[in-house]
Structures are given as C-alpha cells and as structure tokens.
Amino acid sequence: MTASAASARRSRLAITLGDPRGIGPEVARRACAAVLEQEPELTVVMIGPEELAGVGPELWDVHPVEGWDSTEEGAGRVAGLAIEAATRLALDRNVGGIVTAPIHKPALHRAGWRYPGHTELLQELCGSHHVGMLMCASRTHGGRALRVLLATTHVAFRDVPSLLDRDLLVGQTTLLDDALRRDFGLEAPRIALCALNPHASDEGLFGDEEARFYAPAVDLLRSRGIDASDPLPADTVFTRALRGEFDAVVAPYHDVGMAAFKTASFGSGVNVTLGLPFVRTSPDHGTAFDLASHPGRADATSMTEAVRLALTMARARFDSDSPDV
C-alpha cells in the first residue's frame, strides 16, 4: 500500500447498518453526519441493503449488499452480509476500522449466522485466536471516563466458573493492557481485576476462585510488567475506577460489568472488540424496534461516540504503525 493510500485509510471507516427494521440505519446516518461536521477528513463507506445504504450519498460512499425482502430472515441476511463486506474491506486495508449498528440475533440465526453476537462472528471471520469485549465511555454521568472489559461475554451464568481460569484472566488483561497503550495512548495503564465472589471471597469464606485463579494470574501479569490489582470486590471496584484510581476494570462475567457500566453511562457507551486486526466499535444499545417507526426519536449519541472513537483509534494505529502497513 502506498503512503497516500495508507494515509487515506487513516480516516476511512466502514459503517454497517445492522438490522433494517431497527434504528441502526437512522442513527448511523445521523452519527456520521454529526462526526463529519467536526472531522471533515472522515470518509464513510455505508454498508447495508441497497434501498437504505444510499440515503445521503452526498456525505458518504455506498456499498450495498442486496435488497431486503421485508422478512425477519431477510433482515438477518442483509445484516450478516454487511458485516462480512465490512470485514473484507478492513482485512484488505481499504478502511481503517468498522462501526457496526445493532443486529437482531434471532434474525441473524435464522439467516444462517449462528453466533452469539458480533464479537464472535468477527472473531471467526478474522481467524483471531483471542478477542475481548471492552465497553468504553469517554464521559459517564459522574463526569469521569470508564472502561470495562468483560472476561467472559455472552454465556450462561452457570458456565462462568468453568470458563474463568488463570489463562483467561491473563489473556484478557494482556489484550486490555495492549489496547490501552496502543489505542488510548496510556503509557502505564492501571488495571483493576473485579473479583468473582462477594467480598473477593473473604479469604475463602465465599469461594476459592480468587486464590486458585486470580492470585496466580496477578503474579504472572505483574511479572510481564502489567499493573494489575489484586481481585477487588465488585461492589466497590467500579466506584474506585470512576474516582480515577484505575484506567480500566476487568469484569469476570457479562452482567456484573454491564450493570455497572450502563448505570454510569447508558446512552453514550461504546463497545470495542479487542484482538481483531482492525478497529471495531459499536453503540451500547440494541435495535429498538419500537422506535424505528418514529424517525427522530432515537438517541444517536452512542452511535456518534462509536464513530468518533473508531476514528480516534484508527488514527492512533496509523500513527504507531508504518504508513505502508
């Protein structure tokens, strides 16, 4: 890739429209228009069903997949095809990153993509061995930023104890440390590990995972130069992060992390997939079918933040890599 082509990729993003029955197409258009007002160098490639992707062609390039037949399976199909198309553009280095509008998982399943969500589908498409789900809010309701990595993601709660071990904690925390340095510009990230059990088990009174898994994980992480805390109780660790003691928190399972994150920042949070060969972000909300028939009522803040963060991260990667990669 020439230096000029790489420079153009620095500010070029692919945007998938998600499920056409939801608010994705609307908030994607509004978000891109809002960011373009402040970032005129941004180039957008809008990807989705042909009758929706072309709305507003004066502001962005259009990459239609096919028409939507108005069925649920068809909605899942155009959403899945858009994700695949965006991934190809990113892997071929035609864009610096992708931003994905919300999908409806049952529709995606009906169309043949049987994955728990975007994260797992993108992992498969890219052949990535380890990925991480990082929730980011540049500003919460209390004012400070909050970043929460979910060590386990879309799995049943009963499966969490069998998935959580030393290697998972080390791998996920290492992914997070790398991202905080490379994509967020933090020279010495401070990472808190949220415990699995109440009161971090109170020295074994309420479980032994903190001793069996967390302690050896912390030792290994620190030996690698990663500033990781001892396991800290869930009822205080997020408050401490919001006070500025930590740059990010690793949560052991989905809801303990998401409950704290969305309480602090709902409507402006961004989902970032770590471990992919390109930047990927998405808003922190779903399809909101009930709002889709009422144009203008959906809040585009989270999608706008997702576009803005993807652009920032893509530029950071460009600046840290050689121009021809």
Image (cartoon, rainbow, N blue to C red):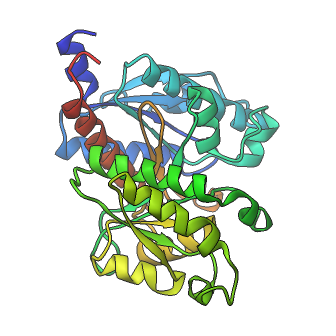
Q: Is residue 152 above or below residue 110?
A: below
- Left or right? Give the position of 157 relative to 196: right
Q: Nearer the viewer, residue 274 or 269?
A: 274
The percent coordinates of residue 148 (x first, y second) are 45, 64
Q: In which quadrant will I find the N terminus?
A: top left
Asked where in the image residue 321 lies, by quadrant, the reply is top left
- Left or right? Give the position of 288 relative to 31: right
Residue drawn at the location 60% of the way across and 43% of the way down: 118
Q: Nearer the viewer, residue 306 or 317?
A: 317
Asked where in the image residue 207 lies, by quadrant, the reply is bottom right
Q: Nearer the viewer, residue 59 or 65?
A: 65
Residue drawn at the location 81% of the way across and 38% of the way down: 110
Q: Nearer the viewer, residue 23 or 184?
A: 184
Q: Is residue 303 above or below residue 253?
A: above
Q: Is residue 176 above or below residue 227?
A: above
The percent coordinates of residue 315 (x first, y second) are 23, 36
The percent coordinates of residue 127 (x first, y second) are 59, 27
Residue drawn at the location 21% of the way across and 22% of the way down: 322
Residue 27 seen in the figure: no
For the image, the number of numbered tags is 0
The percent coordinates of residue 196 (x first, y second) are 62, 74
Residue drawn at the location 62% of the way across and 46% of the way down: 103
- Left or right? Give the position of 309 relative to 211: left
Q: In which quadrant will I find the C terminus?
A: top left
